[in-house]
Amino acid sequence: MDAIISPVFPYSTLLISILEITLLLFGFLMYAVDRDRYNYRFIILVTYFLQYNIINGFLPNWEYNWFVNIYWSIFMQNILAYSSGIIVAAYYFYFLTVQFDIQFGKIFNIKFLLISLFASFILLYCVPYILTFDTDFAKNTFIAIPSIIALYFALKTAHFIIKGWSLAIDSYQKSISILGFLGIMFMATMPIVIIWGDHNKGLNHLLVNIALLLTFYSHILQFIKHNQRFNRKINNKNKYLTLKNKMTKREIEVITFVAKNKSVKEISELMFVSPATIRKHLSNTYEKGELKEKQFNEFMAKYPNIPSYFC
């Protein structure tokens, strides 16, 4: 006889949903500021966590009789509940592999993860349940394989993240790696907590959403780091544009030739003017570049990418 399954923590589900909706709004805000694919993937990730929290917070429940036969109703509810868990786990793994640039292998990839989890669910949960209509028997038959798969992918991902941490060159990347490692460890507890029973739903949701919060913090650090590089790039581009707007067309031609290692004599021959004229153009350029010594080496130290911006 199956035990009655009902949502134990409906208020917790509501509170966690509010938290996830808040993170989702932050995700949309960051995407509005920077329409990067990483921000887009974070929105999808939080959306999957939200649907997992809602579905698993209230299902399965014997009070929700969708069919004439209550056992078929519970079967369909479990399909929804377990499928949402498989999807969020698979996408979380994909999110981390992209974030940390982890290379896939023959088995270590998102396609194998999804196929193996859904195949084990169909063969080890759906088939036993249809034959026995015993949820406990079907769950106990099914849960071991996903736990092993989750542990393998978690340890493999953690290995790559730790390797990335050891190679990190700044505090941002080290912090992001630590958060990623902790996140995958908390996420790996999902099937382990399920083994203990449905009365641990609240604990399962807590641990899984700790993984989401760690990922959110990691995403914020990544967002800050990315935008620092973006702002430096914009400022650098503006520096060159400001200089270019001050210069005449002939001065731009001269400094571009010089940046390509042409001598004053070679430039004068190419432009059909005297070397004195070339030196005058260079002197004017150094002055417009606001240099104290007005020397070529100082100019190139301040504006090293002249060919890229002026050509």
Image (spheres, grey):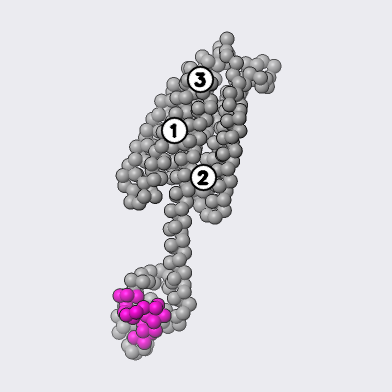
Q: Position of residue 198 (x, y in %)?
A: 53, 21
Q: Position of residue 91 (x, y in %)?
A: 49, 37
The residue that mark 3 highlights is: 197
Whether residue 78 is visible, yes or no, is yes
- The residue located at (37%, 33%) in the rendering is 155
**Real-space CA distance between mark 2 and mark 3, rounded to the nearest whole angstrom:** 32 Å
- Is residue 9 part of the magenta span, yes or no? no
- The residue located at (40%, 29%) in the rendering is 151
On the rendered structure, is 75 left or right of 235? right
Residue 145 badge: none
Q: Is 283 above or below relative to 113? A: below
Secondary structure under badge 3?
A: loop
On the rendered structure, is 167 left or right of 234? left
Q: What amino acid is at disc 2?
A: Arg
- The residue located at (32%, 78%) in the rendering is 296
Q: Is 76 above or below relative to 101? A: above
Q: Is 140 above or below relative to 23? A: above
Residue 41 badge: 2
Picture quadrant of residue 293: bottom left
Q: How many marks?
A: 3
What span is colored magenta in the figure?
Answer: 278-299
Q: Position of residue 170 (x, y in %)?
A: 35, 51
State yes or no: discs 2 and 3 in contact (Cβ < 8 Å). no
Q: What amino acid is at disc 1?
A: Phe
Q: Residues within 10 Å of mark 3 (few under 14, many from 20)?
A: few
In which quadrant is the N terminus drawn? top right
* Magenta-colored segment: predominant secondary structure: helix
Q: What amino acid is at disc 3?
A: Gly
